[in-house]
Amino acid sequence: MTKIFYYLNYYHIKNKIKDIQMFCRINTIKHNGETDKIINNLRDQKDWYDKIEGLHSVTYVKLSNKEFMGCIIYDSKEHLEAANNTVKEFMKTNIMPFIESPPIIVEGEVPWRYSRRL
């Protein structure tokens, strides 16, 4: 239990000290149904994710056999904006061959979050 509180406190304090508000981009993507191929492709990109400064987490949720929702969290809006060109290139190479329509994109500040670390 102490680890959980430490983790939450760490991120709260870290963001307060830097005066940074974590920022999230959510993409809803309709694709051609090649779910396994898309997910394997995303999993194979760990080295690429590690190179993006300020990238906190990437989560994809399967909404249906032909639709995903991606939740990408950055340390700040500035980090998200700095990564835009790199992310566009990544999407062009790894996602665009599978999508059926332009993704729906929304973004905003992350005022609070909980994450359990075991």
Image (tube, grey):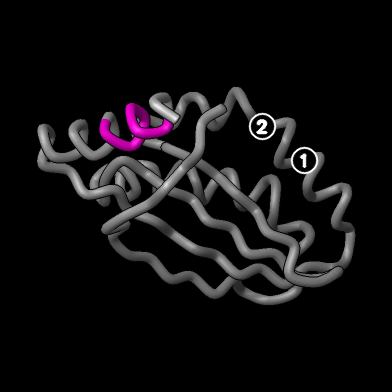
Number of numbered tags placed on the structure image: 2
Q: Which mark is residue 89?
A: none
* Residue 21 sits above or below residue 16 on the image: below
Q: Which residue is mark 2?
A: 45
- Residue 55 percent location from the top left of the image: 42, 37
> In which quadrant of the rendered image does the C terminus lie?
top right
**Mark 1 burial class by Cα count in 10 Å: few <14, some 14-19, many 20+:** few
**Mark 2 burial class by Cα count in 10 Å: few <14, some 14-19, many 20+:** few
Q: What amino acid type should be assigned to the residue bearing mark 2?
A: Gln
Q: What amino acid type should be assigned to the residue bearing mark 1?
A: Asn
Query: Which span is picked out in magenta?
Result: 4-9
Q: Position of 68 compared to 16: left or right?
A: right
Q: Secondary structure at mark 2?
A: loop
- Residue 65 percent location from the top left of the image: 86, 69
> Hey, which quadrant is residue 7 in on the image?
top left
Q: Which mark is residue 41?
A: 1
Is 7 in the magenta?
Answer: yes
- Residue 112 percent location from the top left of the image: 31, 55
Q: Are marks 2 and 1 in contact (CB under 8 Å)?
A: yes
Nearer to me, 56 or 85: 56
Residue under the image location 10 percent in, 41 percent down: 19
